[in-house]
Image: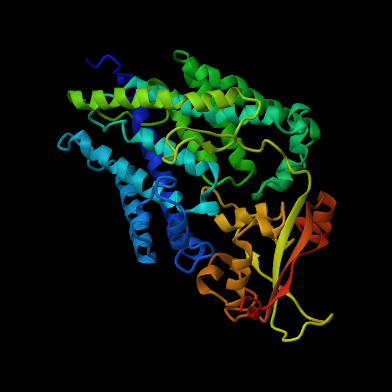
Amino acid sequence: MDWLAAPDYWLTRLVFQRLLALIYLMAFLVTLHQFRPLLGERGLLPVPEFVRAVPFGRSPSLFHLRYSDPLLLAVAWSGVGLAVVAALGLFEGPEWPVAITMAVWALLWVLYLSIVNVGQTFYSFGWESLLLETGFLAIFLGSATTTPQFSLILLIRWLLFRVEFGAGMIKMRGDRCWRDLTCLYYHHETQPMPNPLSWYFHHLPKRLHRVEVLGNHFAQLVVPWFLFLPQPIASVAGLIIVLTQSWLVLSGNFAWLNFITMTLAIASFDNGALGHLFAIVPYHPQETPTWYLAIVLAITALILALSYRPARNLLSRRQLMNYSFDPFHIVGTYGAFGSITKERYEVVIEGTEDAVLTSQTKWHEYEFQGKPGDVRRRPPQVVPYHYRLDWLMWFAALSSPMYHEWFVPLLRKLLEADRAVLRLLARDPFAGRPPRFVRAIFYLYRFTTPAERRETGAWWSRELVGDYVPPIQLRTFR
């Protein structure tokens, strides 16, 4: 009955699961450190208000039963513990039934789904749905003692295909600069969160930028089709994807997006390919339970049925980017940077302890963990960690604060010197004291030229544009 058995992919499954568990671990650690100030009972967008307004059917989550900050911590710590269990491969020996391994992965998925579905705009990034869809497939991969099923290997490759090909198509249908090969004249400078090498990437010769774009088009529009061909062609396709994703890790900070894409690419390699990198461990499969095979077949049929709309979306002129067609994030559509901003604007938040504002008032800047602020501060290395507030500050600079429901609450928290929110920042200029006024200033940022860098030591140059939010004080909210 086990006609879909793929024993040549047992090492593939092992490496895939261990890497995915580490990504889950990072995701839950981010939740532990950032969820409460952003979304907790006293957060910028409190979950209790959200679950009162949004029904369970639209956003399934355990927190619809009850939310409290201690309960959130319990969920996040449970996720951390389960991720460690999965990363170490505990409960996968011959003495443990495959159902135990499946339960560990199922709990990871349920807990993270519960977080994402109440995370609102702070959890609206495409890699959240991608982690959930990948995690859902991982539930059914089995344990070290079961023979991998090739249908699941193909479903992982199908997900990788949608990630890569979807990103390629959204670019070709989007900004003209992707078609004339000039997008990377701007992207390294204007991406949401540059890293320590982004300045150097930006100053590469323009002909190399055009080569980068051509390489991106090849990796995203051509290579994914070869994932479904026999070995070693599928392995070569996976290797190209891993290399291009590694290039993106070198040039910018994109949370765990690139890492989970590389993890998905592991499914393109068989034991022979991975055996060159990882030590071969003894493999002693037991007889695969009939009930497990039946579940695998049912899940395969479910994913194929749910794939209709994402597949149609790939062919649509009105292609959606990073969209889930169901509230469980089981099968979605992906893509990134369909349009490129040509100039970088930054919102800089300042405060003052002066009781009366005059032309002589001294304003002091708050410094964020990852986003540009101090022009002499080198862009930091962040990935695979994810600073959610910093990312949304990039989006805030693209439009008015009225479109960002979290921004004014952030200013209020700074006026209150809220300790939880201040811990999200790199520097509080008032050392925990509440300022009298805060304001948000709009700047145009650009990378310095090599000559400017040698002369000033600055990585950025900035030009004042005007107010983003004029000075406000705490009594404004009363």
Give the left or right position of residue 140, taking residue 185 as reference: left
Residue drawn at x 26%, y 41% is 103
Q: Quadrant of residue 74?
A: bottom left
Residue drawn at x 72%, y 47% is 190
Nearer to the camera, 459 or 124: 124
* Residue 80 in view of the camera: yes
Quarter of the figure that contains the C terminus: bottom right
Picture coordinates of residue 405 (x, y %)?
61, 59
Q: Quadrant of residue 207?
A: top right
Nearer to the camera, 44 or 377: 44
Picture coordinates of residue 373 (x, y %)?
70, 61
Residue drawn at x 51%, y 53% is 120
Picture coordinates of residue 257 (x, y %)?
53, 41
Eyeballing the image, is 77 above or below 224? below
Quarter of the figure that contains the N terminus: top left
Eyeballing the image, is 217 above or below 330? above
Residue drawn at x 68%, y 31% is 171
Outermost bottom residue:
355
* Residue 385 in view of the camera: no
Nearer to the camera, 179 or 114: 114
Eyeballing the image, is 298 above or below 68? above
Picture coordinates of residue 371 (x, y %)?
65, 57
